[in-house]
Amino acid sequence: MTEWIAVITITLLAVISPGADFALVSRNSLLLSRRAGVLTALGIGLGVLIHVGYTLLGVGLLLQQSAGLFNALKLAGAAYLIYLGVRMLLSKPDSATHSNAQKPAADGAALRTGLLANALNPKTAVFIVSLFMQVVQPSTGLATQLGYGAFIALAHVGWFALVALCFSAGPVRDRLLAARRWIDRLFGGLLIGFGTLLALASQHP
């Protein structure tokens, strides 16, 4: 029970802290559609499961101890965030107005964006590895650890789905869509900023 309380508390605090995932879900919900925002949130949850999977396999310890491997993940994540940010800065206003004509390809793109952004995020990797190493006892059964992992993923999906619902609400969306060009620039700049800070961070946890 003590482990569960610790996992739930730490996870919820980590999930609601603003970052690249929040920027992506907010932007996709506002400029694309509620469906795109929720699918981005689902992709984030799948990315979390990837981190949980390799942590349970013991690869997480290698990632934490290897500066080279960690830096490679960090640079890959930074490059992806900067790439997304540049795409937003260069996007045309009309490209974000077809929210009523979501296609399977667009759904897949939203899901993939959330998945890659989280799977390549070293902060999520460090969070999950540290949580399992410092909170979860070696004697904890595999089924319970899988339960922890499932909760962490579902907490991410639930929170970011809520964010998607809020940013895609009619009154909010209708007011902000008029400034969609500047919104794309704002979120694009934020992602480039997150990516740049990630690339410049040289301290290995």
Image (cartoon, helix red, strand yellow):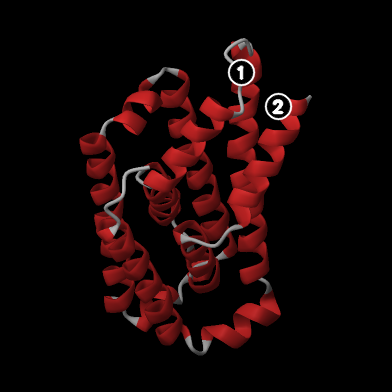
Question: Could you say which is closer to the camera, residue 174 or residue 62?
Answer: 62
Amino acid bearing label 1: Gln
Residue placed most toward the observer, 98 or 11: 11
Q: Residue placed at 49% from the left, 61% from the top? A: 19
Q: Quadrant location of the N terminus?
A: top right
Side (left or right) of 25 relative to 117: right
**Residue 30 occupies which quadrant of the picture?**
bottom right
Q: Position of residue 96 (x, y in %)?
A: 42, 74
Give the amino acid type for the residue marked by disc 2 in the picture: Glu
| Residue 168 in view (yes/no) | no
Residue 58: image location, x then y, percent: 40, 18
Q: Secondary structure at mark 2?
A: helix
Instruction: Kindly identify which residue carries mark 2.
Output: 3
Q: Give the vertical position of 107 relative to 128 (above or below).
A: below
User: Residue 121: x, y in percent?
Assistant: 38, 47
Residues at circles 2 and 1 in contact by the CB criterion of under 8 Å: yes
59 to 8, vertically: above or below: above
Q: Residues within 10 Å of mark 1 (few under 14, many from 20)?
A: few
- The residue indicated by pointer 1 is 137
Q: Nearer the viewer, residue 47 or 11?
A: 11
On the image, which quarter does residue 20 sit in?
bottom left
Residue located at (54% from left, 51% from top): 41
Q: Earlier in the sequence, mark 2 or mark 1?
A: 2
Q: Secondary structure at mark 1?
A: loop
